[in-house]
């Protein structure tokens, strides 16, 4: 377990890397005994600093929701991070590439809550009842820790590698669309890079929302009405570069486009 001073020091390093768009050495290389709970404490300290600076929390992201990603990282459950108001973009926006580090894009669905959702014991049905609407979304990954040898502890500490989200315009109530079978066809500069369906996220994307409510209960928190929940990617991350144009077709949920400049 990390000491409070070590936790604060790492959180400060990550805050500086976020400000300068830089990358720091792996936490687990310097503190090999650091645990997942240490990582969430680092993330919480970083989050509280951002809130003290005037940023507003608008939701949470869930990561590592696919079996393939969990096997690759040697864990058995997803992770989560927080999302602030200045990280939300709309379809068609131009995103400043230099604002991010190790920039990749993932295909997701976002759940916007009408009611609070709290664990323990939250279920898929509870998550769907708490949802006002679902929209397609792209997540922009933003990693401030060197990627080589990175572990789940590093990723969680780094706010689960969250950088930004691009929200689509098509809103659907959970009962208006067969959510597990929403497709995603992701193109970069006119070339198809990744395809998938939302069932790749724990069998049903809202399962991740219920998992998050239960996980937050362990950390003394809950999901609030109005929060946006990125439910996890159903494609592999695609690397992007300055000048790239990204388009994703979600079938009945419409399309999203953005341009990295």
Image: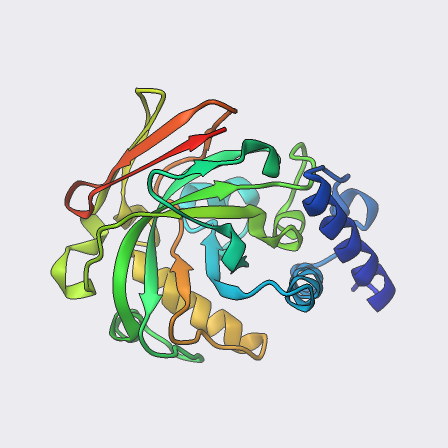
When the figure is inspected, residue 178 is found, relative to residue 23, above or below; the finding is below
Comparing 62 with 83, the one in front is 83
- Residue depicted at x 40% and y 62%: 228
Applied colour scheme:
rainbow
Foreground residue among 47 and 205: 47
The x and y percentages for residue 151 are 64, 45
Q: Residue 137's spot in the image, x, y percent?
A: 35, 47
Q: Quadrant of the N terminus?
A: bottom right
Residue at x-position 42% and y-position 79%: 118
| Total numbered labels placed on residues in the image | 0
Indicate the quadrant where residue 204 lies: bottom left
Q: Is residue 253 visible?
A: yes
Answer left or right for 33 relative to 108.
right
**Relative to residue 249, is residue 112 drawn left or right?**
right
Q: Nearer the viewer, residue 23 or 52?
A: 52
252 relative to 126 in the view: left or right: left
Mark yes or no: residue 33 visible.
no
Residue 142 x, y percent position in the rendering: 57, 41
Query: Which quarter of the picture shows residue 148?
Result: top right
Residue at x 46%, y 56% (from the top left corner): 62
Taking depth in this image into account, of 13 and 62 the one nearest to the observer is 13
Q: Is residue 97 above or below residue 13?
A: above
Residue 175 x %, y %: 14, 65
At a point 30% along the width and 20% down the height, the residue shown is 190
- Please tell me whether residue 64 is drawn above or below residue 57 in the rendered image: above
């Amino acid at each position: 377990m990390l000491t409070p001073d070590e936790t604060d020091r790492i959180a400060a390093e990550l805050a500086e890397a976020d400000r300068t768009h830089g990358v720091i050495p792996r936490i687990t290389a310097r503190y090999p005994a650091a645990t997942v709970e240490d990582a969430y404490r680092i993330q919480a300290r970083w989050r509280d600093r951002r809130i003290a600076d005037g940023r507003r929390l608008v939701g949470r992201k869930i990561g590592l929701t696919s079996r393939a990603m969990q096997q690759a990282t040697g864990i058995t459950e997803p992770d989560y991070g927080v999302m602030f108001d200045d990280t939300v973009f709309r379809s068609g926006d131009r995103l400043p590439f230099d604002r991010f580090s190790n920039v990749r894009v993932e295909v997701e669905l976002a759940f916007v809550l009408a009611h609070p959702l709290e664990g323990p014991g939250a279920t898929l049905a509870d998550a769907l009842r708490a949802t006002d609407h679902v929209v397609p979304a792209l997540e922009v990954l933003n990693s401030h820790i060197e990627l080589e040898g990175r572990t789940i502890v590093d990723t969680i500490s780094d706010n689960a590698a969250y950088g930004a989200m691009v929200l689509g315009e098509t809103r659907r109530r959970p009962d208006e669309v067969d959510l597990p079978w929403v497709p995603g066809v992701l193109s970069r500069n006119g070339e198809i890079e990744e395809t998938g369906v939302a069932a790749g996220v724990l069998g049903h994307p809202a399962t991740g929302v219920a998992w998050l409510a239960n996980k937050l209960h362990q950390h003394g928190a809950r999901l609030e009405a109005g929060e946006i929940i990125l439910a996890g990617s159903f494609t592999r991350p695609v690397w992007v570069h300055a000048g790239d144009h990204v388009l994703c077709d979600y079938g009945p949920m419409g399309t999203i486009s953005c341009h990295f400049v």
